[in-house]
Image (cartoon, rainbow, N blue to C red):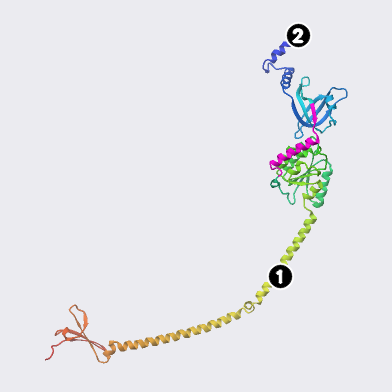
């Protein structure tokens, strides 16, 4: 009976599962375990969020979390492996683990079975940050051309910082002291540890999508290199570079600046400095307004005085002091010239009339009318063509030719008679 019972699941597992032929849970778990156990060992990097190593147990349990995402895995290792790590491993430390994926059949859980754990030291962390810094710099993330200028007076300031932290207090107090009406939207997040990067990125996307926020401040006080690791995370740096709202980095750690300082549009040395940089000083602006008003008043008064002097000079000119005098003088001059012109024209007409009369007299004296008046006459006859011609010789006419005799006061007709012998 037992042999038949053991063989029945095996036959069922070799057949495809269906509604009529489902696989038992143990079969599915065994298949998953067989597939996972064929995977090879891998090197994994992450942050330790929990360590469970009970006294007298052979196995220790760790929770390894991705610093840039909300993803974690369970890691098991021999307890003696943890005891060999110097200095002792603590929560929040960055480690590199060599492990093999393992599926626990009884609980149906997946974990990593580690056979080597290496703590990432300060030197290695700084070296990784330096490599990332060079990579981002080569991509132009730190270029001054891509950095945006902060608005002169933002209608809203987003603040990402730790809850009830000194950084939050410094930013609020200094900003409100400079401009009391400034409006803040505060989003409190973790600023160190494994939860920092996901929470800061979520807060950044929330504030970036808010149309009432004109500038975003990411603030935190000083800390060790390990504490400030989230602010050198590549995912966070790229998210800040891609944000549509100007971002101010206010991480109070002078010796080693996190990469966020290079990517942000404005880097402030401390949260106090950020509170002074995001808004103008109301006293300074009021004094500047008064100064500009005084300058404008003096400039206006100077312009008015200049124009008044010009008007006075114009009124003092003869043409404006006695506007009718020049017209009257010009009128007199015109009358004089008109009289001269009239006399010149009359003189010329008289001269021309005398010349015409003299020419007429000479023409009359030389003309045939004057000769006729002295008793002479002009005899004319008609030629063969019927044209009237002046008789110049008796040979030009014959007896009985009709003649026309012109005298001073008219003309008479005559006929030729025979010549007397």
From the image, give the main secondary structure of the stretch colored magenta.
Answer: helix
Residue sitting at x 60%, y 81%: 325
Real-space CA distance between mark 2 and mark 1, rounded to the nearest whole angstrom? 120 Å
Label 1 Cα crowd, 10 Å radius (few <14 / some 14-19 / many 20+): few
The span picked out in magenta is 116-142
Asked if the residue at tag 1 contacts the one at tag 2, i.e. Cβ–Cβ closer than 8 Å, the answer is no
Image coords of residue 259 (percent x, y): 75, 41
Could you tell me which secondary element the residue under label 2 belongs to?
helix
Could you tell me which secondary element the residue under label 1 belongs to?
helix
Residue sitting at x 69%, y 13%: 11
Q: Which residue is mark 1?
A: 305
Pick the residue in front: 404 or 282. 282
- Quadrant of res 101: top right
**Horizontally, is 84 left or right of 356 in the view?**
right
Tell me which numbered mark, 2 or 1, is placed earlier along the sequence. Answer: 2
Residue 279 falls within the magenta-colored stretch: no
Q: Which residue is mark 2?
A: 2
Residue 209 appears in the picture as rendered: no
Residue 137 falls within the magenta-colored stretch: yes
- Quadrant of res 318: bottom right
Image coords of residue 242 (percent x, y): 70, 41
Pick the residue in front: 92 or 128. 128
**Horizontally, is 345 left or right of 267 in the view?**
left
Q: Residue 75 bears which disc, if any?
A: none
Pick the residue in front: 236 or 173. 236
């Amino acid at each position: 009976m037992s042999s038949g019972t053991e063989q029945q699941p095996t036959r069922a597992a070799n057949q495809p599962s269906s509604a009529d032929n489902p696989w038992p849970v143990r079969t599915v778990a065994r298949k998953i375990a067989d597939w996972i156990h064929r995977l090879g060992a891998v090197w994994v990097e992450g942050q330790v969020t929990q360590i469970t190593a009970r006294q007298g147990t052979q196995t220790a349990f760790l929770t390894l979390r991705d610093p840039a995402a909300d993803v974690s895995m369970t890691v098991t290792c021999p307890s003696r492996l943890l005891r060999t790590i110097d200095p002792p491993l603590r929560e929040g430390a960055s480690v590199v683990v060599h492990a093999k994926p393992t599926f626990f059949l009884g609980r149906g859980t997946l974990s990593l079975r580690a056979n080597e754990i290496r703590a990432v030291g300060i030197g290695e962390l700084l070296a990784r940050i330096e490599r990332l810094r060079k990579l981002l710099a080569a991509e132009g993330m730190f270029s001054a051309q891509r950095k945006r200028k902060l608005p002169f007076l933002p209608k809203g300031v987003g603040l990402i910082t730790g809850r009830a932290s000194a950084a939050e207090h410094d930013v609020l107090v200094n900003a409100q002291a400079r401009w009391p009406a400034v409006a803040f939207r505060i989003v409190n997040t973790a600023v160190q540890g494994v939860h920092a990067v996901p929470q800061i990125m979520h807060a950044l996307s929330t504030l970036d999508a808010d149309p009432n926020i004109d500038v975003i401040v990411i603030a935190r006080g000083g800390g060790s290199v390990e504490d400030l690791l989230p602010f050198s995370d590549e995912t966070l740096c790229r998210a800040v570079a891609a944000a549509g709202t100007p971002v101010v980095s206010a991480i109070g750690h002078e010796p080693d600046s996190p990469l966020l300082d290079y990517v942000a549009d404005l880097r402030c040395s401390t949260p106090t400095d950020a509170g002074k940089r995001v808004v103008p000083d109301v006293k300074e602006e009021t004094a500047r307004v008064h100064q500009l008003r005084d300058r404008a008043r003096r400039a206006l008064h100077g312009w008015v005085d200049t124009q008044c002097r010009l008007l006075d000079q114009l009124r003092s000119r003869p043409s404006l002091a006695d506007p009718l005098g020049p017209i009257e003088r010009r009128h007199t001059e015109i009358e004089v010239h008109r009289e001269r012109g009239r006399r010149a024209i009359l003189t010329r007409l008289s001269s021309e009339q005398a010349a015409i009369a003299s020419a007429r007299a000479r023409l009359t004296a030389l003309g045939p009318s004057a000769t006729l008046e002295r008793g002479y006459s002009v005899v004319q006859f008609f030629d063969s063509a019927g044209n009237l011609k002046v008789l110049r010789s008796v040979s030009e006419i014959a007896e009985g030719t009709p003649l026309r005799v012109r005298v001073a006061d008219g003309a008479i007709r005559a006929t030729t008679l025979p010549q007397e012998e």
